[in-house]
Image: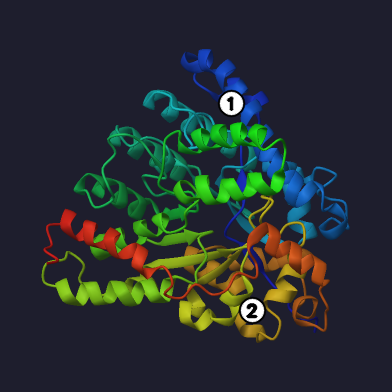
Amino acid sequence: MDEKKLTVVSVDSHAQMPPERWSEYLDRRYHDLLPGLQQEQKDYSSIIGLGFDATHNNQLHVFDHDGVYEAGQWRGLWDLDVRLQEMDREGVAGEFVNNGDGRVVALFFESGNKVQSLDACRAGMQAYHRWAHDTFGSRPDRLFLVGAVGTGPGDDLDASLAELDWIADRGFRATTVPGFTAYPGDPSLLDPRWEPYWAKCADRGLALMVHAGWGHAQGSLAAGLELAARKYVEFDGDLERFFQFSFETIGADILDAASPRRAMWQLMLSGVFDRHPDLVLIMNELRGDWVPSALAHLDEVWEAHRDELPAKRPPSEYWESNCHVCLSFIHKDEVSRRFDLGLEQISFGRDYPHTEGTWPNTWDWLRDAFAGVPEEELRLMLGDNAIGRFGLDRATLDGIASRIGPTVDDILGDHTVDPSLVGHFDLRGGYLKPYEGDARVAEIVPMVEQDLADMGVATA
């Protein structure tokens, strides 16, 4: 009997509408805004392109031995056939598809856009959904679409609920948590105003997604990129100085990884999972090495205030029952500490076609990251956990994997990954970063205390 192939499910990939399709899907009432968006696209792609040059275009000899990056196979961002080709080439049976990419701006509703009216942002979000369904919706066996309802404005809750129904009716599997783009006037997730949103997602079987970038203010990334562009000119093209400035200055406000974690404990402590026990929260592309220490602190907070909090259980229990972590472009230390995170809470994400992700080197990335991991644990993290947690069609995905998936030996066999390629994994995705542990717990303490105060819980 042939060895059963590995069924790989990536819980993180991306799509974005190409500029030439904007006028086709955007409500005509907002077409007068498109010339400005075209200029945004020009400015956005020019500054983001500097990063591509530094980490990818100048390193093709290190990571692009098959020539797929140089050939433009990242175009699966908006091309179904190319995406399926790259899924087959990398042995990925199925993958979740989020909006957003560094090559092209969204239709007004992401933090990388300049500030527009809430109505225009809502129209852009709706246009994205209709394009995504038309482009990728014909392959629900392999592509699991993630809506961007929570990335659009939340001022009109009835409109948001109607959009949740629209995407659920068309087979979308998840949607973003409100506040992904933080619009003026939107309340925090603790506000009872969001209860119908949670109820609708629970009723329609939509998982909730918190992805890296959640919580950034409308226009904030666009403003940061404008500043970066000015500094690049000042630095006379010195990329080393430019990147140091970007990470130390812009990153402190925009690219910080601690703020999106807040959504997790706000849902936990406010009792959302008690009221909707079937809801699933996905923490995506936020690493996982902070989770055990954060949960330990949150459990202490819950124990100290359990009689005053809506939450009926300690946060660590909600983590097991309602939460999932997608270790998108998984780091080596996260694999070594997998039991601290909870082996059955972990899924893999390749982040296609983002330049920081495992594509186009997914097999080599997995070979190095999972070296020495038992087969049963490998199967759980690469696909079985996601299939079980999200109710995916196991027989269909196993059938696809039997055709295109890697064997166990392809990943766990005696393979040597080129050290220069491993170095590139670290350059583009922080692959070798040390385990965070409790190093940043102090940063979340004031956030938690503010949330407790907002819920009327005295902390003094």
Residue on which the image places disc 2 = 378
- The residue located at (48%, 44%) in the rendering is 147
* Residue 199 image offset from top left, x and y in percent: 29, 51
Q: Callout 1: few (<14), some (14-19), or many (20+) C-alpha neighbours within 10 Å?
A: many
**Left or right for 157, reference 116:** left
Tell me: residue 309, above or below residue 244. below
**Left or right for 94, reference 71:** left
Q: Spatial distance from mark 1 to mark 2, Cα to Cα?
A: 43 Å
* Residue 427 image offset from top left, x and y in percent: 70, 60
Residue on which the image places disc 1 = 40
Which of the 4 image quadrants contains residue 435?
bottom right
SS class, disc 1? helix
**Left or right for 118, reference 25:** left
**Left or right for 408, reference 244:** right
Q: Is residue 338 or residue 11 the one in the foreground?
A: 338
Q: Is residue 325 visible?
A: yes
Q: Callout 2: few (<14), some (14-19), or many (20+) C-alpha neighbours within 10 Å?
A: many
